[in-house]
Amino acid sequence: MYYFIKYGYDGAKFTGFQRGNGVNSIEDSIIRVLSSYGISTDIESAARTDRGVSARGNVFLIETGRNIKDVMGILNARIENMFFYSYALLDDYINPRHNSMKEYSYILADYENIDELMAKLSEFKGQHDFRNFCTVDNRNTVRTIDNISYSKFGRLYIINFYGKSFVWHQIRSIMAFALAGNKNPFSLTAKFTYIAPPEPLILRDIIYDSITFTNFDYMKHKRYMKRNIEMARTRYVIYEIFNGNA
């Protein structure tokens, strides 16, 4: 049987995404556990995030005859800094890259002039050739960004990008261009060579219009999330003390 599994991870804790990318890549970590339990020796990923980029809603395809809840429990119990929280039983094989929409978010701390930034980012909406705003490989660089919006969380701004597909380094290149105060992105005659840091970027979700996911209570199997939140808050206060603000 074929399943889609939705999962998240802290990208800073891994050596990259693709298998063979260091000793602790995201795909290798998943496949290693699946193989050790005789569940599967392969997965197909919906999105390959850059090294350092996190995810809340990435997806991979697995073929297995095992009870999927047992599989989810094993993955959550055996892999640190990941969480596996929903699944969908498929009628047949579906390429997980054939999604309807992806949502990415880029997080900015204590940013000023958000309206000016959003005006610059709005120039990237719609269908364009992003050749000058990505690392070119063998894929078509013409892509469509359906929308770019923002929300606020405390002192943070969260910039949200919506589109069916993105090319390598596209969002990080766009953010670097807009943060530098540049205008008229598609008047460039050469590649924009800067990209924003990967750590503030997160893959929020991948949406499939015709597929329904079933939630799985991963917190029964993994308690590290609460511990990591507490640790992150503690580190935040430590740096505020360093700055004389607390």
Image (tube, helix red, strand yellow):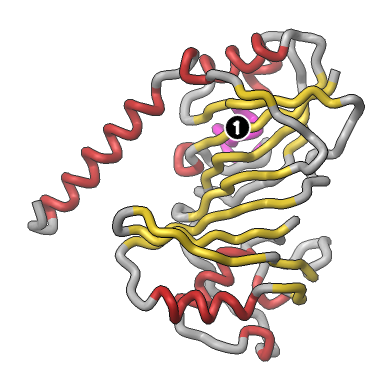
Question: Which residue is painted at 30% across and 59% down in the image?
Answer: 155
Where is residue 95 shown, x and y percent of the image?
Answer: 85, 39
Magenta residues (range): 20-29
Question: Which residue is painted at 53% across and 41% down in the image?
Answer: 15
- Residue 115 makes an appearance in the image: yes
Front residue of 125/222: it is 125
- Give left or right: position of 72 versus 80: right
Q: State the SS at label 1.
A: strand
- Give left or right: position of 197 versus 88: left
Q: On the image, which quarter does residue 223 sit in?
A: top left
Q: On the image, which quarter does residue 24 sit in?
A: top right
Question: Which residue is painted at 54% across and 18% down in the image?
Answer: 217
> Which residue position holds label 1?
7
Where is residue 146 shown, x and y percent of the image?
Answer: 70, 65
Number of marks present in the image shown: 1
Residue 67 lies, with reference to residue 53, above or below; the image says above
Q: Quadrant of the N terminus?
A: top right
Question: Which residue is painted at 46% across and 37% down in the image?
Answer: 13
Amino acid type assigned to the residue bearing label 1 in the image: Tyr
Where is residue 119 shown, x and y percent of the image?
Answer: 52, 80
Residue 221 lies, with reference to residue 86, above or below; the image says above
The secondary structure making up most of the magenta span is loop
Residue 3 lies, with reference to residue 107, above or below; the image says above
Front residue of 134/148: it is 148
